[in-house]
Amino acid sequence: MRRRRPAGRLAALFAADVLDLGTQVLDRYGGGASRAEVPVTVPVDGRGVVVVSAAPPELADPGAVRRPARLDLARTAGGLAAELAFTDGRALRLPGVGRPAPQPLGSIAFDIAGAGLAVSATGVGGEPVAVEVDEATARQLATALLLTFRVKLAKAPPPASVPRAQQEA
C-alpha cells in the first residue's frame, strides 16, 4: 500500500536528509540554541533569478553573481523551520516559484518535517503571499538546501564540546 503525503508537504524523498543536516547546522551555528541566523551567499543570474542546480553554481551559470543572504533556522515542534532572504532587502526570485515569471519575494520559508516540506513566502514588503510550488521545484529547492547545509557543515568550526584529539581522529 502506497502512503500518501500530507497535504501541503513536498519533496518527501529528501525530507529526512534536509531535516537531519539542517538540524546539524542549527546545532553547530546556534551553539545549542533553538534559533540561529546562518550567513550564506546565493548565486543570482543576469536576470536576477536565483540559480538552483545540483551542479555547483559556477558550472550551472558561470556568469552568476553571489549575493549575501541569511538563512534563519529554528527548531519547531515537528522539525525545523528555515527562512531565506537577501540581507539587502532585494527581491528573491526563484525558478518555478510564480508564473509566468519568478515571483518577487521578500523571503521564502520551509517548514521541514519527516513527511516533507511546506513552503510559504512573504512579499518584498513583508506581507504573506500565496506561492504555488510543484513537486519538481520543491525537489530542486530541497537539493539546494541539502547542498547549502553540507557546505556550511564543512566550513563550520568544530563543535566546542568535542575534545580536539577526538576531532582529529
Image (cartoon, rainbow, N blue to C red):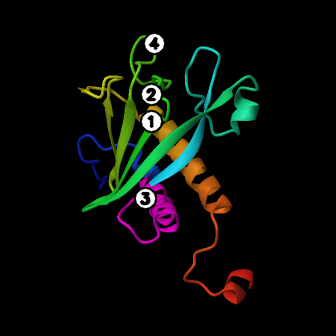
Q: Which amino acid lies under the numbered mark 1 shown in the image of this protein?
A: Ala
Label 2: element kind:
loop
Q: Determine which of the numbered discs, if any, sits on residue 85 in the image.
A: 1
Task: Point out the frontmost of discs 3 and 1.
Answer: 1
Mark number, residue 19:
3
Q: Between tags 2 and 4, which lies in front?
A: 2
Comparing 120 with 7, the one in front is 120
Tally of numbered tags: 4
Query: Disc 1 or disc 2, which is closer to the eye?
Result: 2
Residue 25 colored in magenta in the image: yes
Q: CA distance from mark 1 to mark 4?
A: 19 Å
What is the x, y in percent for residue 57? 69, 34
Residue 16 visible in rendering: yes
Please tell me which of labels 1 and 4 falls first in the chain: 1
> Which residue is painted at 63% across and 40% down in the image?
54
Residue that lies at the very extreme toward the front in this rendered image: 88
Pointer 1 and pointer 2: residues touching (CB < 8 Å)? yes
Q: Quadrant of the C terminus?
A: bottom right
Residue under numbered circle 4: 101
Pair 1/4: label in front = 1
Question: Does label 3 or label 2 sit earlier along the sequence?
Answer: 3
In the rendered structure, find residue 89 and report the number of the disc placed on it. Answer: 2
Q: CA distance from mark 4 to mark 3?
A: 29 Å
Of pointers 4 and 3, the one earlier in the residue sequence: 3
Q: At label 4, which amino acid type do we have?
A: Ala
Query: What amino acid type should be assigned to the residue bearing mark 2?
Result: Gly
- Quarter of the image for residue 63 reads top right
Please provide percent x and percent y for residue 110.
36, 44
